[in-house]
Image (spheres, rainbow, N blue to C red):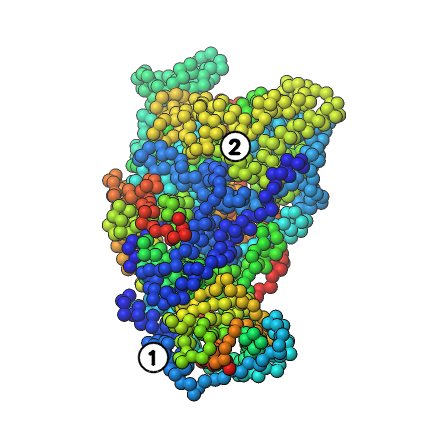
Amino acid sequence: MSKGDDKRNDGQGLTRRQLLQVAGGAGLAALFSSDKASALQEFEIADVDPLKRYPYRGWEELYRRQFSWDKVGRSTHSVNCTGSCSWKVYVKNGVMLREEQAADYPPINAELPDYNPRGCQKGACYVEYVYGAQRVKYPLIRAGERGEGRWRKASWDEALAYVAERLVDNIYKHGPDTNTFFSVIPAMSPVSFCSGSRMAHLLGGVFCSFYDWYCDLPPGQPITWGVQTEACECADWFNSKFIVLWGSNISETRIPDAHFAWEARYHGARVACVSPDYNASAVHADQYLPIKPGTDAVLALATCRYLIEQGVYDAPYVKEQTDLPLLVREDNQRFLRMSDLGPKTKLTEATFLCWDASTEGPKPLPGSQGSVDKTLKLGSIEPVLTGRWTVRLADGKPVRVTTVFERLKKQLSVPLYSISGAARRCGLSEADVKQFVHDFATRKPAMIIHGAGTNHWYHNDLLNRAMILVVALTGNVGKNGGGFNHYVGQERIWPEHGFKALAFPRGGKKQRWQNTTMWTYCHSQMQDPHRINGKPIEHYILESVRQGWMPLWPENNWQALNAGQLHNLPRKPRALIVWRANYLNQAKGNEAILRSLWKQLDLIVDINYRMDTTALYSDVVLPAASYYEKTDINSTDCHSYIHPFSKVLDPLYESKTDWDVFGALAQKIEQVIKKRKLQPFEDKKLGWKRDLSRLYADWSDDGKLKTDEDAANFILSHSAETKGMTYQSLQDHPRRFVATDPKAWNSDIEVGRAYTPFTHQVEKKRPWRTLTGRQQFYVDHPWYVDFGETLPVHKDPQDDPQYPLYWNTPHGRWSIHSTWRDNRYLLRLQRGLPLAYISTADAKKYGVADNDWVKIHNGQGAAVCKVKIRPGEQPGRITMYHGWEKFLGFQKGGWQSLTYIKIKPTQLIGGYGHLSFRLNYWGPTGNNRDVKVTIEKYTGPVAALASSAKKKALK
Amino acid sequence: MSKHQYAMVMDLNKCLGCHTCTLACKKQWTDGDGMAYMYWNNVETRPGQGYPRNFDRMGGGFDVRGNLRPSKLPPLEDYGEALEYDYGQRLFGGSKKPVMPHVLADYGPNFDEDMGGDDTRNPYHFYLPRICNHCTHPACLEACPRKAIYKRAEDGIVLVDQERCRGYRHCIRACPYKKLYFNVVESMSQKCIFCYPRLEKGRPNACAAQCPGRLRFVGILDDQESPVHKLVVQHKVALGLLPQRGTGPNVYYVPPFLPPKAGHPRATVSQDPRLPVKVLERLFGPRVMDVVRSLEGELRRAQRGSRSEVLDLLIGRNDSVRYALRPDIMKRSASGK
Amino acid sequence: MNKESLILVGAVTVALGALIAVAIARKPHRSGLSTGATKQTVLKLTPLAAPKGTSQKAVLSLGHALWSKAPQIPLRLSRTPPLYAGGHNRDDGHRPSATVRLVKLTGGEVMVRLSWTDPTEDTSKRTKRIADVGSPKIYSRHPRSVSGFADAVAVMLPRKRGPHDSYPSLMMGHKGAPVDLYFWRAGLGFQKLSAAGRGTTTLRRREKLGGVARRTSQGWVVVLPVGKVPARTPVSFAIWDGKRRHRDGLKYFTVWYEIW
């Protein structure tokens, strides 16, 4: 610790608690030592009617003093809640007292409700973490076993040297791909993200994904639309006339935005809530559909069938914007391609045909990846949606073809997708299903607000595709107030170009990327017992890696290995650096990870402001600045504004901003290289000669990115969205983006109009970013053909039938993942301990009473926690809102002890037009809804309570 | 009677149950010693036991003859202890046992969260945020033998004089809403102050200003331009809580209308209510179903494409719609310049 | 609620501290039973004169030899009538056994030593300021009760010391006849208060009151200095039993005595 650090800590002797006492939260009477007012009272009060008048008002000053401050700073929270809420932090006597939403987002137009006040109950007590008992104040080096919580306080110099030596060892002895870096969601604090991603990039390290791993990625979007995720900003909900909350409990998980839906209702929208449990969003719906878990695709496809049967779909839209008119060969279930009819080239392979009514023959449609016409305009073509025809292939062979639409109709014709069939399978009444489909047929614009409730299923790709089909058939995609809007994770960073240039300066091709679902599954002993088409998932993983569809680091000789060796590879990861994330706590099957992967790693570093589960199980914990002590920027899919983090106070204790931590680490690595006289080396795989003796110069771009503010300005000045903005200019109020980068986005930002995606396609007729250039519901990749998933279809959950109850771990209202799970202000408003919710019927069935201790278990592990009986919960399911830290309140295990990774083969494919690996964009998701468990009352020992105080009754 | 009366309307059809109001208030006013257990603003699930437990069944307020009705002084168990956690031991001290609270809660301010009515096929609940009602006839004021509670003439805000209170707690017994709390450290009763220091500066109450559900409307009841006047007096869609207790509450609620029962997608609230009428009537009095029917009618009209004046107001597009604050009428005491 | 009933409630509320509630409520400062109007009922309290040079501090020690020499006078305690419906305010007939001893210092200051029986120790435990988060002490420092009341005692003297033609109202004096109160509450400590009528009690923040209290096996012993007291100054006493939820006018009280 330097002298400078010492200085920063001055004045911190006064704790927030003490300050509160001084400020007037306590010790109220102490503020008034004067008897002047009081002396009068005894003579006057007798005649006073306090309902009318009161003479002694001087004391009122007390509360006025409490509502006073010295300084206000603007900041926000880096927590992947998709909120992105601008807050003001109030400081008095050098201590952060409290926060309040800044509530100064400018309106989009006069008709739309504004975004203020934006921020929830969690944001309202973040200050607790700044001064709380969980705060990491000094660099710590492990002094006991991992996870034991025994530490040695270290100097920054010592801690950085410890990390640098080991990283360098790995690079020179084992290869750069044994160092693994994990951080999440750049949009919530891109500067902090980039501080470490730049280092991963420059060291040749492996950079892990998060959006797919956390199953926030809706794979149906890359499949259907060729995008990672696109959703309207939430103000656009107000423009809707039919809103379906589908797997999204907005009142709990979109707290800052939910008002738009309930206000839309007053504006003439009907709101339907499809959810197994009667929840905080269901209470305000016009229709609540208590669907059986895992059957949502049935309801969506029954809706599609109804729309088609009744002829109430939007035919012109479907013909122009979707692949439903494309021809499919009946002999091999592949699209009919231009290459089938003529010479085979890259372009003709990616050009597709419809049946043209005007010429009564097959006609190539413009806009596909192989088409030279980059438009969706049909011109004189009149695609036909239904029919079967014969075409002659290039070799003269006749082949029967039909349309995707026709195939869809046929597939939907089974009884399951009739109104009554769907009602039965989904556990709904026919009247409710009828009302639901009727609303879709008659109310426009209509949108689905989609979330993790449905997206976390194994068959999430099918679920997504089925739901998108509903809004595409009704012509709602690409229109204000319409669409399939998926909000899980603050995934999209608006100023993308500047961000990418800062995060991975030499570009994506020079970076080792890793899908974390595969990395975790393969490098731990977790094993999915299911067989898929008779084969274990390892078979498909290895096939995908061998094909070069999905990467798996560290590099191994894949051709020489067999699937059985995937969990014990010759070359394994050796170091894991985690920042801005709680990898271990949030990892599916974390008990298995602790038993295997954690044992293999030589170095685990966590950079954190609080001691979370990952930090607790690390070797080195470096104290990071809290959200109110750093410079950064923040944006979200949910709105179209950008606003800053600020150093309301300089980093407290010995903490540093992420930017400064990695800057210091870069300098330390340089020192180690120089001290050991290590020479530059050729990183052949990436074609990069790495000279780590100038790491800091490269990391800081020769000093141009010395500070976090430099980095923030770099992003802003290198992005079309933030043209003309500087970090300082964001301090006044959040600013709306001024434009969109057409490479990254599918709509323009327009003054006075809520952002909704895909107007480039729907209004400007630009092709979709898919193989067919259309919203693509038909996928003819051979694995999709093999698995029967060329079209959206319902498949039953990939569950474990030997156990009776689904283990449901959704996002809830009291935490953002693990953040705030341990916050006492919020725990006091729950029951203070991890809680599992069970229906009244199941409570009776399994003999548990409200507030009992229970043991929940399956083949993977067990958790012992408290139970709460909730009538709104559906029988057949236990819900535990996710994120509970492993160390808090569980008498055994944790919420992830029961889960494990289940990879779906259709998400391992590559080399298919738009479907090829991209970090956080295309890769297997870490789903977790299909897990099943059982429950029983727990009567074993319970850890002693924190209190030593005896209960002294004073009644 | 006060010259003017500040009032608040909460639209329960917009409440998210998120407790941001609770935290806003807690961090603004009740974060001091002896206050941890107290929530001047709380949110409770209804039907449910509420906070403190069964406060609405304890009596209080006035009987028909205007006498104080019997009630009780709730023990701490009815509020729930403010939990504390010893993180230091587990995270930094090498303790092997899990972090535990200092007591196992068997009640708390939100213990019944999301539970509601136990109807297997058609469960029902809604959220009820509560602050002090700043009553026209405050039972707390009536019960205080020391006249340490008064109602401000200029704006109707009811306050407990933090210099004169002697901690007798007659007020807590008398209040039918149990919205006064005893601070053991200060040995005084404390309560919601309707954020007068904020209102004086032209800023809405913390619970309203910070409400992301935007369900709170604040203004002077007799100001015809204020949203509270429009909702309470003009459109008559907002009702006081437990009106039969005779205190004349000045916090009003737009009552909730829950979704229809399963299998009856077009049924109106009165035809086939998911939420039993008696639950609503017990809380909001006999007029509640008239209000519910009228609101439901407005909603259906809006959903058919017409515009509804009252719903347009309840949309509350921005602060200027939701709040009509009058710092000009609020007189600051001599020392408060 | 109509105005009449409000007045009625007010009147009943005022009817504290006397046995004939309504009559007293009308004219609280002329309460027949307990004022100087009935001089023949005067109860004398005679302090023991302390030897010259005895300090107040010394007498504040409960074990000081003077206390055993001072005459021990049993107090006749009454119970205030019920004010509110609701159970806990009923007079259960119980009276603590209470005695008082007085010592007068040479300067004229009188020290009052009260002892009374109370089998349960009820203290308001004026909870200490909560330590900062992370401190293990925090767990024992939240209040464990908000509905408990503390044992307490008070000595009341007219502000005008010396002989009185008519006594101030027993209900905290009355307008024009203010009283001083020397007050101790278990857990809260000592306070000097003043009042000029029911409901007017005011804390004299600047006047710190030194006193000493001790829990005994049977009850409490408290010594309070009440300042200079000329002969024939009226005095009365009150005792609150926390267990019985006593506070405010819910208490045991005596009528006026005189210090001779």
In this rendered view, identify the residue nearer to me: A737 or A506: A737
Q: For the point 44% across and 23% down, which residue is it? A: A723
In the rendered structure, the answer to whether residue A514 lies left or right of residue B249 reads: right
In the rendered structure, the answer to whether residue A525 lies left or right of residue A426 reads: right
Q: CA distance from mark 1 to mark 2?
A: 75 Å
Reading the image, the residue beneath label 1 is C23
Q: In this orientation, does residue A4 appear?
A: yes
| In the rendered image, the vertical position of residue C114 relative to residue B165, given as above or below | below
In this rendered view, identify the residue nearer to me: A569 or A113: A113
Within-10-Å neighbours for mark 2: few <14, some 14–19, many 20+: many
In this rendered view, identify the residue nearer to me: A305 or B308: B308
Q: For the point 37% across and 79% down, which residue is it? A: C31
> Where does residue A105 sit, x and y in percent of width and height?
40, 35
> Where does residue A556 sit, x and y in percent of width and height?
67, 27
Looking at the rendered structure, whether the residues under marks 1 and 2 are on a common chain is answered as: no
The residue type indicated by label 2 comes to Asp
Quadrant in the picture for residue A135 = top right
| In the rendered image, the vertical position of residue A316 relative to residue A380, given as above or below | below
Reading the image, the residue beneath label 2 is A632
Numbered disc 1: what chain? Answer: C
Tell us which disc is closer to us: 1 or 2: 1
| In the rendered image, the vertical position of residue A388 relative to residue B21, given as above or below | above
Q: Which label belongs to residue A430?
A: none
> Where does residue A760 sit, x and y in percent of width and height?
38, 23
